[in-house]
Every structure is written in structure tokens, then in C-alpha cells.
Image (tube, grey):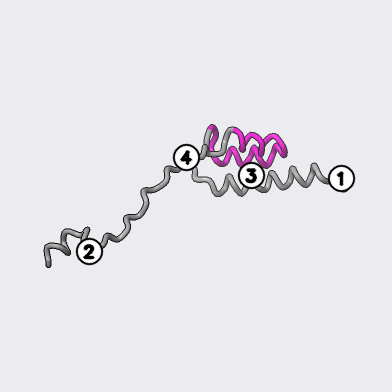
Amino acid sequence: MLRYLPVLLSLGLTIYCVVDTIQTEDEAVRNLPKLAWLGLILLAPLVGPVAWLIAGRPRTVAVRPATPPTRPRGPDDDPDFLKGL
């Protein structure tokens, strides 16, 4: 069983990288065209997926937290309501 582990890990990494490459937008892929990355991943079983993870995958962008939604104001804080009194 232990001798099959490297083969299974390599196969799993290859499948993950193929799916990740297919789902990545064309403009976000770095250094090579998307089709070239797919060929490299499929033709070089261990080197291709590792290269994709290091050099081809899009860099993640830090997302700033959105401004919190404005809470409803009470009637005494709403100028439109106070005008109608």
C-alpha cells in the first residue's frame, strides 16, 4: 500500500491542478497561456502541477472588508421625518 502512495498523491495533485487551471479565467493565468499550462500539467506528472502552483496560478488579492451596512436610523435622527412633524 505504501508504494502506491506517491502515485496516488501525484495523480491527485495533477487532477486538482487540471481542474484549477480550467476554472481559472484566461486573463488571470500568469507566465504562459492556459492551454500551455494544461499541456505542461498533463505531460510532466510532478513538475507540471508544482510549476502551476508556483508560477501559473493567479495571485490572490487581499480583499478589504466592505463598509458595514448602514443601520436604520431612528425617527429622531431622520431629518425627513422631523420635517413632516
Based on the picture, tell me whether residue 77 belongs to the magenta stretch: no
Tell me which numbered mark, 4 or 2, is placed earlier along the sequence: 4
Residue 48 to residue 82: above or below: above
Structural crowding at the residue carrying mark 2, measured as other residues with C-alpha within 10 Å and reported as few (<14), some (14–19) or many (≥20): few
Between marks 1 and 3, how big is the CA–CA gap? 23 Å
Q: Mark 2 points at which residue?
A: 75
Between marks 3 and 4, how big is the CA–CA gap? 22 Å
Q: Position of residue 55 (x, y in %)?
A: 58, 33
Q: Residue at x 59, y 38 (%)?
A: 36
Tell me which numbered mark, 2 or 3, is placed earlier along the sequence: 3
Q: Is 74 or 17 nearer to us in this picture?
A: 74
Quarter occupied by the C terminus: bottom left
Q: Name the residue under label 1.
A: 2
User: Residue furthest toward the front?
Assistant: 76
Between marks 2 and 1, how big is the CA–CA gap? 70 Å
Magenta highlight range:
31-54
Tell me which numbered mark, 4 or 1, is placed earlier along the sequence: 1
Q: What residue type is labelled 2?
A: Pro
Between marks 2 and 3, how big is the CA–CA gap? 56 Å
Structural crowding at the residue carrying mark 1, measured as other residues with C-alpha within 10 Å and reported as few (<14), some (14–19) or many (≥20): few
Q: Where is residue 20 in the image (x, y as percent from the top left)?
A: 59, 46
Q: Mark 3 falls on what kind of element?
A: helix
Q: What residue type is labelled 4?
A: Ala
Disc 2 and disc 3 in contact, CB within 8 angstroms = no
Mark number, residue 62: 4
Q: Which residue is drawn at 54% across and 32% down?
A: 31
Disc 3 and disc 4 in contact, CB within 8 angstroms = no
Q: Which amino acid does label 1 sit on?
A: Leu
Tell me which numbered mark, 2 or 1, is placed earlier along the sequence: 1
Q: What residue type is labelled 3?
A: Cys
Structural crowding at the residue carrying mark 3, measured as other residues with C-alpha within 10 Å and reported as few (<14), some (14–19) or many (≥20): many
